[in-house]
Image: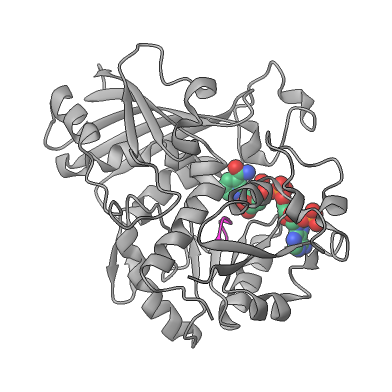
């Protein structure tokens, strides 16, 4: 099988670097183009990065000398020479909305990490193990855009990927209300401790826009396709507080939940242990073998110990117990730049390829 040719827009950033590492040995995808801002264009990837490489593995030798393109000015060339692009850029929402749509209209599918199109009604927001059927809304989006190949798909915010997977297994019990407090890593802001020394020995109780995303995005993920758009789920009230904590990678959530049909603790554990994974059997290379993993130990999961479970693509859960105000409480954890960003984005692209929505040109 010929590999799919792939471009990364925002290749020098935190998510872009993760995408680079995930392309290195990918069995289906071959990195063909690296692009970022006009500041980087014309330089080799290594020169454009300067001292910014912050992955724990070394910069893959085969990508060092790739010549950077300008993701905006060179859009036509990039769209023509790739089967699809990943996009993770730091630009204004209006700019991102316009520029992602431009790629789609040039018949280049866009697998986006950015939030700009998350509320475009016919753009699916995919967590592959949770709502893979939402990819069907792409048929309507293509009609609107007038394309045959091109479309945009987004992944959700990284914060919700720590707790929505655990709650999704419990939807059959009628989730009524949820309170989630998230403890989010600094890589979620595209930062390291070197570049953000104020975070050492500190907690910052504010992440702009994050609480609204954490409360609203699960409702789109749990929504339904009606009349060519995704209509939000109703009847679930979510409230969130999001804190930045001094860890490099990994978002932890403390979750409280109440249900209309009260499950026992045993039923909840059974639902997690026997999660019916809708993408099992598709053979997607980045899919974890076990999506939801419950830890019996009272002090697990821990961010540092458990964020890399199944290459950072699994979700770790622990501390399930009754609550005095809600029915139950528990904690859950996922890796924010792998499961929550680049890894989730790659898995989403694999899903579209497996389902025939992206085909080699
Ligand atoms: N970090 C996470 O955990 C995470 C999780 C989920 C989603 N996201 C989202 O992913 C996106 C990228 O986040 P990040 O953390 O990777 O950001 P980042 O580390 O700040 O990187 C930003 C990237 O955008 C590029 N860029 C900036 N201005 C540009 C322009 N005018 N045209 C083209 N490219 C431009 C930069 O290129 P230069 O090097 O040329 O400046 C760089 O490659 C954001 O939308 C963010 O919200 C991040």
* Span shown in magenta: 112-116
**Most frequent secondary structure within the magenta stretch:** loop
Whole-percent x and y of residue 221? 36, 54
Whole-percent x and y of residue 57? 68, 37
Relative to residue 66, is residue 100 drawn left or right?
left
Residue 316 in the image: above or below residue 85: above
Whole-percent x and y of residue 54? 73, 37
Whole-percent x and y of residue 280? 28, 51
Residue closest to the eye, 292 or 321: 292
The structure residue drawn at horizontal position 45% and vertical position 54%, both measured from the top left corner, is: 347
The structure residue drawn at horizontal position 69% and vertical position 15%, both measured from the top left corner, is: 201
Residue 140 in the image: above or below residue 330: below
Magenta residue check for 4: no
Relative to residue 57, is residue 254 drawn left or right?
left
The structure residue drawn at horizontal position 30% and vertical position 63%, both measured from the top left corner, is: 133
Residue 182, can we see it?
no
Magenta residue check for 114: yes
């Amino acid at each position: 099988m010929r590999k799919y040719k792939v471009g990364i827009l925002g290749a020098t950033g935190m998510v872009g670097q993760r995408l680079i590492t995930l392309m290195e040995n990918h069995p289906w995808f071959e990195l063909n183009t690296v692009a970022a801002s006009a500041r980087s264009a014309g330089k080799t990837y290594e020169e454009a990065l300067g001292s910014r490489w912050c992955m724990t593995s070394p910069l893959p030798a085969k990508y060092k000398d790739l010549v950077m393109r300008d993701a905006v000015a060179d859009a036509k060339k990039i769209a023509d020479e790739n089967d699809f692009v990943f996009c993770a850029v730091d630009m204004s929402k209006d700019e991102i909305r316009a520029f992602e749509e431009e790629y789609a209209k040039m018949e280049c599918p866009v697998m986006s990490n950015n939030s700009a199109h998350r509320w475009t009604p016919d753009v699916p927001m995919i967590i592959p193990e949770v709502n893979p059927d939402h990819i069907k809304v792409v048929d309507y989006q293509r009609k609107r855009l007038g394309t045959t190949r091109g479309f945009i798909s987004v992944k959700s915010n990284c914060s919700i990927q720590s707790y929505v997977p655990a709650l999704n297994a419990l939807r059959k019990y009628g989730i009524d209300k949820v309170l989630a407090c998230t403890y989010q890593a600094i890589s979620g802001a595209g930062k390291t401790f070197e570049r953000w020394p104020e975070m050492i020995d500190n907690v910052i109780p504010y992440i702009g826009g994050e609480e609204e995303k954490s409360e609203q995005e699960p409702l789109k993920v749990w929504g339904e396709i009606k009349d060519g758009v995704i209509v939000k789920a109703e009847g679930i009230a979510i409230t969130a507080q999001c804190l930045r904590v001094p860890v490099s990678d990994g978002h932890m959530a403390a979750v409280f939940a109440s249900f209309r049909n009260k499950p026992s603790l045993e039923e909840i554990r059974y639902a997690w242990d026997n999660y019916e994974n809708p993408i099992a059997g598709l053979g997607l290379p980045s899919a974890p073998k076990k999506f939801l993993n419950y830890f019996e130990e009272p002090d697990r999961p821990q961010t540092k110990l458990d964020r890399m479970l199944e290459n950072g693509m699994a979700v770790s859960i622990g501390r399930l117990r009754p609550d005095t105000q809600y029915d139950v409480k528990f904690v859950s954890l996922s890796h924010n730049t792998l499961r929550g960003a680049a890894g989730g984005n790659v898995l989403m692209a694999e899903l579209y390829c497996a389902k025939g929505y992206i085909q080699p040109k």
